[in-house]
Amino acid sequence: MYRYIALLVVSTFLMSCNSTRVVKTLDKGEQQITGSFGGPAIIFGGAPIPIPLSSVGYAVGLDTGLTFAGGVHTTSLLFGNAEVDLNMGINAFKTKSNKFGITVSPGLHMIYGFNGGDFSIYPQLEGIAWKEYGNKNNLIFGGLGTWVELDREKAYGEVQEHELMPYITLGHQFTGQKWNFQLEARYIGFTYPNENIVVDYLGPFSTGTSGVYFGISRKFGKK
Amino acid sequence: MKKLALLLTSGLLLSSCLRMDSLLFNPDDSITEYLLDDFDGETEIDLDGSYDLPDSTEHVFTLTSDLEGDLASIYAVYVGDISRIATDTVILYLHGNAGHLDYYWPRIKLLANVGSKNRFGVLAIDYRGYGLSEGDPSEDALYEDSDAALRWLKENGLTDDRLIIYGFSMGTAPATELMANKRSMQPSKLMLEAPFASDEVMVQDASGLSLPGSFFTSLEINNAEEIAKINEPFFWIHGTADSFLSIETHGEVVYKNYDGVYSTAYRVEGGEHIDVPAIMGYDAYVEAVLEFLEYTP
């Protein structure tokens, strides 16, 4: 059994899927569709490999500095789970030049399993600082987020000691004429040891796991 | 929007196709014959020549396993004198999810050295899809193939009181299932090495969250619950450094849920998933197994 079902890493959907939040809030009336592809890295057969997870999302600017975003996690769907995230991007701060700002995104991540009828819900909160630069308004961004584990029990009544599943994110957005391309790295669950847990995660200091995500988005509507 | 709806609907229709159940199994069917002592591939543990057994006591043969009409010829190895099964005590060894019988042969030999050479008979099988056994592995096949081994032992004169079942890793699933829910025979003692509690614990270990196992698998393996049905004496051994099936989240839960007449536990300091007998020391391991086999309630 040793190491051979490491692909159970797919069970890390919730802690690894990129939520479909926006880095920088949209203008009022502006809309955006996104596709995200990527996931955590594990050691498999002695080599690091990324686990590809995918999601599609939609966002709309409800007001200046207030953007609703939601997404469906398509890989999870193929496993018989309806997994969605809903969140609200709030511009907490930005400079007058609109070149630097902070976006705070509270949200909910929900999953329903059609095979067992089970349902799980995870509140999430993320804060991202972003900076636009150059003529094309490319973005660099970084921040901190967390999932909140509401269930205080695990299987067989064992105590769930993880109350939060925090992550650090760092990324870059290439802004194109119509399409934007985003590359993002995450360090997930960095407060938890990653040893003796069935999967060989690739995380520094024997904690958490690292992940790489590629996103593509297109804005439309009011500009 | 219509395209998105179509995509979502298609995903849902496909949803019953993708489950992780088959990933539980990692059979190796690349061999053309069982080599036992002559096998020079990777094995879980290495034994020196002092554990070798007389060739005359090593028997490779086939059994027929009937899974609701799906007949498969599965391979087995019996170590001992088949003609004495009617009077000997026999250990049924159910191996883990990787490889085939050659891979586990040193472990089988080790059990055949308990007490003295061939003091106890040892039977081991390759489940469907493993080694030269026909068919494809599945949870139901694990149970049926293991029960085929019980039927063979019964046909050769073994009685329940002289049957001990030993499961390692994935093999702890059929071992616990057959012990908790009698089929062809009711073993008199249960031995589990590095048991896993359930697929749900695996999912929760991997994610760090309290996720239901049903999100990813349809497996019904639940050693942590099944063990509670067992009253017969129970031997549990698990490495404290098991990086695959954590002793805390899997082994200890299984052990804690046992409520039978007698149990003995070995937490092997520094033992990983596959090397517990080696880390414990073969002599100490053999002695511990012997002590349990000789225990009389």
Image: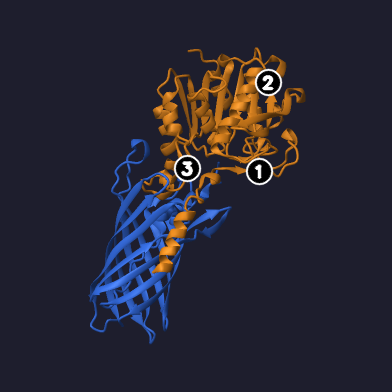
Q: How is the image coloured?
A: by chain
> Nearest the camera: A119 or A144?
A119
Q: Which residue is mark 2?
A: B117
**Relative to B187, residue B94 above or below:** below
Image spot of residue B120 (x, y percent): 64, 19
Where is residue B153, by image quadrant? top right
Q: Which numbered disc, 3 or 2, marks the residue closer to the eye?
A: 3
How many angstroms separate mark 1 from mark 3 (CA)? 23 Å
For this rendering, which residue is in front, B21 or B38? Answer: B21
Q: Residue at the bottom extreme?
A: A135
Disc 1 sits on a residue from what chain? B
The letter of the orange chain is: B
For residue B133, the mark is none
Question: Which residue, given by chain and number where applicable, does mark 3 sit on?
Answer: B218
The residue to which callout 1 is attached is: B28
Q: Secondary structure at mark 3?
A: loop
Q: Position of residue B201 (x, y in %)?
A: 42, 41
Say few, some or many: other residues with alpha carbon within 10 Å of mark 2 (under 14 / 14 to 19 / 20 or more): some
Name which residue type carries label 1.
Asp
Residue B147: which quarter of the image? top right
Name the amino acid, label 3.
Ser
Chain A on-screen colour: blue
